[in-house]
Image: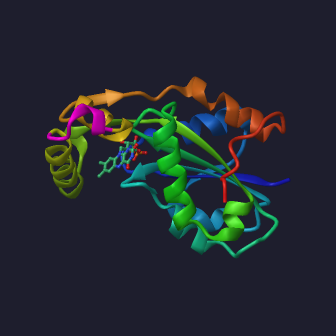
């Protein structure tokens, strides 16, 4: 079965995960801008950074490919918030369910990894967005903060790198047919 890895990454953390996954599996790996190179694949692994709940480049990459109802998808999100936090995972999945076409959701397994952020490298739009989000979040009482706002408050203005390539193991296993990610509840 032909499997291709695509990645959508603005600042490199998703790219590092995707390239490490390619090294571990021997699979071809391309940036989402070259999504046409995945045309005809039976299985697509998409690794993408989370930006305001969306997965960087995923929608456009899916639209670039001819629909294939038999294609399997492994969708790997890379975000700043703790991927072990149940509410965070619920929020990521709710957002994915609202955005992904039904045939993709029906054939998708989801995985969630932790990335990082370096404020000195953010572009103007991203820095502005984070400043506004931070201003709102820091006034929230702690009991109202979720994993996303907590991660933002703790890391605001800093450079942090939570990339852990060992967390690719369940995805490597799923690609070897030995395990599965979560099926979206749709
Ligand atoms: C404007 C902006 C919005 C973000 N939104 C989210 C988010 O909704 N959830 C999350 O967990 N992380 C969020 N992050 C953090 C990124 O997902 C994190 O930095 C990730 O590692 C970026 O991936 P990349 O380096 O591959 O671009 C956001 C970061 C920026 C700059």
Residue displayed at 59% across by 23% down: 166
> Residue 100: which quarter of the image?
bottom right
Residue 98, how many percent across, how many down?
A: 53, 65
Left or right: residue 77 compared with residue 127: right
**Can residue 73 be spotted in the picture?**
yes
Residue 186, how many percent across, how many down?
A: 67, 60
> Residue 72: which quarter of the image?
bottom right
Left or right: residue 31 compared with residue 174: left
Instruction: Determine if the magenta segment contains residue 144.
Output: yes
Residue displayed at 71% across by 34% down: 172
* Above or below, 16 relative to 109: above
Residue displayed at 54% across by 58% down: 96
**Between residues 89 and 142, which one lies in front from this camera angle?**
142
Residue 157, how many percent across, how many down?
A: 18, 35
**Can residue 48 be spotted in the picture?**
no
Instruction: Determine if the magenta segment contains residue 11.
Output: no
**Between residues 14 and 108, which one lies in front from this camera angle?**
108
Q: Which residues are magenta?
A: 139-145
Left or right: residue 22 compared with residue 54: right
């Amino acid at each position: 079965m032909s499997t291709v890895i695509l990645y959508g990454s603005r600042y490199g953390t998703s790219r590092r995960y995707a390239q490490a996954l390619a090294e571990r599996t021997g699979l071809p790996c391309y940036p989402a801008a070259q999504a046409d190179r995945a045309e005809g694949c039976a299985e697509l692994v998409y690794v993408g950074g989370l930006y305001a709940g969306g997965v960087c480049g995923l929608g456009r990459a899916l639209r670039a490919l001819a629909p294939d109802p038999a294609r399997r998808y492994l969708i790997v999100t890379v975000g700043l918030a703790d991927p072990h936090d149940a509410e965070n995972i619920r929020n990521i999945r709710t957002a994915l369910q609202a955005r992904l076409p039904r045939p993709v959701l029906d054939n998708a397994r989801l995985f969630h990894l932790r990335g990082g952020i370096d404020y000195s490298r953010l572009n103007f739009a991203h820095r502005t967005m984070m400043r506004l989000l931070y201003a709102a979040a820091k006034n929230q009482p702690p009991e109202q903060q979720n994993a996303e706002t907590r991660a933002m408050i703790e890391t605001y203005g800093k450079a942090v790198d939570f990339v852990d390539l060992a967390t690719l193991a369940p995805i490597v296993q799923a690609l070897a047919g030995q395990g599965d990610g979560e099926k979206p509840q749709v």
